[in-house]
Image: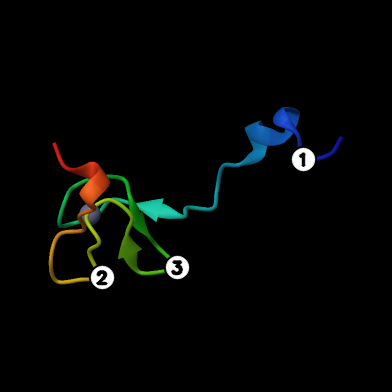
């Protein structure tokens, strides 16, 4: 077995993203120490992109 779809069931254990205490999402990267959703740990402002605006 390689690392195809069949191996996806063994992805448990290692947490890359944990609960972010600023936005509450499950998007805080435990190793990078930044949230991929709001940018917590990376910027003091909320992470925003022009393409993400309403
Ligand atoms: Zn966040």
Q: Residue at x 45, y 67 (%)?
A: 31
Provide residue 14's location: percent of width, then percent of height: 54, 53
Tell which residue pokes out farthest to the right in this image: 1
Looking at marks 3 and 1 on the same chain, the residue that comes earlier in the sequence is marked by: 1
Q: Helix or strand or loop: what does disc 2 sit on? A: loop
Of residues 36 and 24, which is closer to you in this image?
36
Task: Identify the residue under disc 1.
Answer: 3
In the image, is 12 to the left or to the right of 22? right
Instruction: Report the image quarter containing ligand 1.
Output: bottom left
Q: Of the numbered discs in the image, which one, if any, rests on residue 41?
A: 2
Residue 4, by quadrant, is top right
Q: Helix or strand or loop: what does disc 1 sit on? A: loop
Q: Residue at x 72, y 34 (%)?
A: 7
Provide residue 47's location: percent of width, then percent of height: 21, 58
Of residues 54 and 41, which is closer to you in this image?
54
For the N terminus, which image quadrant? top right
* Badge 3: residue crowd in 10 Å (few <14, some 14–19, many ≥20): few
Looking at marks 2 and 3 on the same chain, the residue that comes earlier in the sequence is marked by: 3
In the image, is 1 to the left or to the right of 18? right
Determine the CA span between mark 2 and mark 1: 32 Å
- CB of mark 1 near ligand 1 (< 8 Å): no
Mark 1 and mark 3 in contact (Cβ < 8 Å)? no
Q: Residue at x 20, y 55 (%)?
A: 48
In the image, is 38 to the left or to the right of 18? left
Task: Identify the residue under disc 3.
Answer: 31
């Amino acid at each position: 077995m390689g690392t195809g779809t069949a191996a996806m069931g063994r992805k448990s254990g290692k947490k890359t993203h944990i609960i972010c205490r600023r936005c509450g999402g499950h998007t805080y990267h435990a190793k990078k120490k930044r949230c991929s959703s709001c940018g917590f740990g990376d910027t003091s402002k909320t992470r925003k992109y022009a393409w993400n605006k309403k």
